Image (cartoon, rainbow, N blue to C red):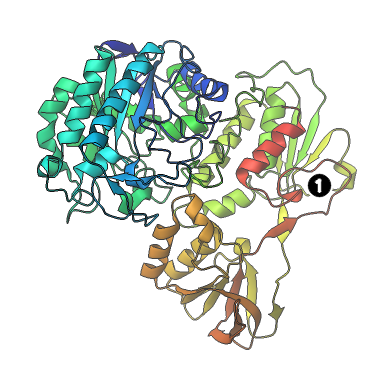
Amino acid sequence: MLGEAVRVGSRTAPSRVLFGPHVTNLGRGRSFSERHRAYYAARAEGGCGVIVCETASVHPSDRPYERAPEPGWAAVAGSCGPALLLASLGHSGSQGTSAFTGRALWGASRIPDVVSREVPQVVEQPEIDALVAGFAAAAARAVADGLDGVELNAGQHSLLRQFLSGLTNTRTDAYGEDRTLLLRQVLAAVRAAVGDAVVGLRLCVDELAPWAGLTPEQLLPLTPTLRDLVDYLVPVRGSGLSVSATRPDLHTPPGFNRALAGTFLGRGLDVVLQGSVVDPGMAEAAVAEGFALVEMTRAQIADPRLVAHVRAGTPERIRPCTLANQHRARDPRNPLITDEAEPRSGHETLDPPLPHAPRPRTGPPLLVVGGGPAGLEAARTAALLGRPVRLLERADRLGGMLRVAAALPARGRFGLLVDWWERELERLGVEVRLGVEAGPADLVGDVLLATGSVPSAPAFEVGAGVRVSSAAEAAGAYGPADRVVVHDPIGDWTGVAVAERVAAAGVPCALVTPDAVAGTQLSRTGDLADANARLERAGVERVLFARVRAVGGGRAVVEDVHHGAIRELPATLVIDCAHRLPDLRLAGHPRIGDCLAPRTVHEAVRDARRAVGC
């Protein structure tokens, strides 16, 4: 059912899978670009049914990030073949930034945004009229540019949601007496502007703040109006108080919005299921339940050919989505959208495509030493390019440090990538030998070294009476009688996850970090607040602005990074989550992955492809 055609308003989509709007930073300034075109075209070629472009600001007062698009879709029109291509239209209101415009933000009421703390300008009737006209004009232009319709954003980062919500709308005029008024005016204007073109609505139906925020019960009475104005509804959750709830990371189970969205089934609306749907089986079940479409955005960033594999009866070949959010593009650094294990996503105009089927074996043999992410991808890529490949791994299973990561709390989805690589290597006929320690005599011919990493030496003095372990070696190294200190000088997910695992075992634990907050780099994935809440609930003591200076005699000596004050923590085991360093035991051949430098999965995969000429 997932791959079958379906009517969406007056149009027909070739499948029931939707690719939702999201920040890409692929723009040329504020314009849609050739990179956008290639990005969307890859998903259409892979079988996606409905593709919704990155949200465009409908009024000059809105510029929520540097490359936020403005209306104008000529660069991407006609790029998606049979797939329906829609324009997402929005205004971020008080959730934007004034950094680029130098103008006051627009808001329903004078309530500071919980993230930026900026107080917006209260929009009056002239601004409201301009906003409604802006939505209508942008919708008309999208259809004139050749798109199949539009999707309006009344979800996260949306002025329309801010007017709907008691959290942000305390007005006493008509727009406060009836908080749905602005949304209804915008929908009516857009429908009039586009005629029978597709109109979708992304609507927050639960702000996770029932004391004043939106709830399904408040919005269900709106459905008769929506039936006359929109062709489909995407119910989503989250507000300014819970930005990460809309596209959470892998700590939130896939399909988290299924019950919420299900409350709108059977009310005369075509409903789209959104919410970390990454498994085709779950998507098929949702269609059987009555959902008209299923949004699988992150799943198609990870594998643009998801629908094609479903149609071919080979769902096991779909590259898994980790849901780690490590490449979210709504970030002050303006990174391009991409995926953990598919670095070509977002780089379609720069990186050559890999063949879908392996080429005839005509290339020279390749020996890959090491079965972590870099070695696995190098072997897979080389085999696809037609080279006989042999892979040696000294451990008794593949995966390297990715297996270690997958054993940490809520990070099991990383193990799905290893399982996928194993299936791919078997399918491609790669010779894999486990438990083999390669030596210099084995390194004959064309060789790639992917031997991984080793723990770095502790950056603190180690005395008797305290055990010291790396994060990779710590599993099972502690018991109820221990007092564990987690030393986290990096601030990524590692130290937080290790501390969570220790605390879950009932062992007293303190996390020492030089930063102002534990896991500071998790702000990039949207997990920072949630991670600290989990540590608090688990009883982990967070020792901030500090670093471990010495351990011994059952104590860890901790120094304040600002004024050098010393304190001692009880410790029988210190787990050092510092950077690992390259394993240099073998030499004389090209290196990829962690044996080159500490690498993420994404960097390791890119290393591998470049090393084999792709």
Q: Where does residue 14 sit, x and y in percent of width and height?
A: 37, 13
> Horizontally, is 439 left or right of 472 in the view?
right
Instruction: Tell me where residue 232 sits by quadrant.
Output: top left
Based on the displayed image, in which of its 4 quarters is residue 26 positioned? Answer: top right
Residue 573 placed where, x, y %?
Answer: 58, 77
390 with respect to 283 (left or right): right
Could you tell me residue 470's position as x and y percent?
64, 66
Residue to which mark 1 is pinned: 438
Q: Is residue 259 visible?
A: no
Quadrant (top left/top right/bottom left/bottom right) for the C terminus: top right
Where does residue 420 sit, x and y in percent of width and height? 55, 35
Q: Residues within 10 Å of mark 1 (few under 14, many from 20)?
A: some
Q: Is residue 241 visible?
A: yes
Between 66 and 243, which is closer to the camera in this rendering?
Answer: 66
145 over 500 or under it: above or below: above
Total numbered labels placed on residues in the image: 1
Q: Residue furthest front?
A: 126
Q: Nearer the viewer, residue 572 or 40?
A: 40
For the N terminus, give its image quadrant. top left
Instruction: Say what amino acid the circle numbered 1 marks.
Output: Ala
Vertical placement of 608 versus 583: above or below?
above
Which residue reaches farthest bottom?
A: 553
Dot 1 lies on which element? loop
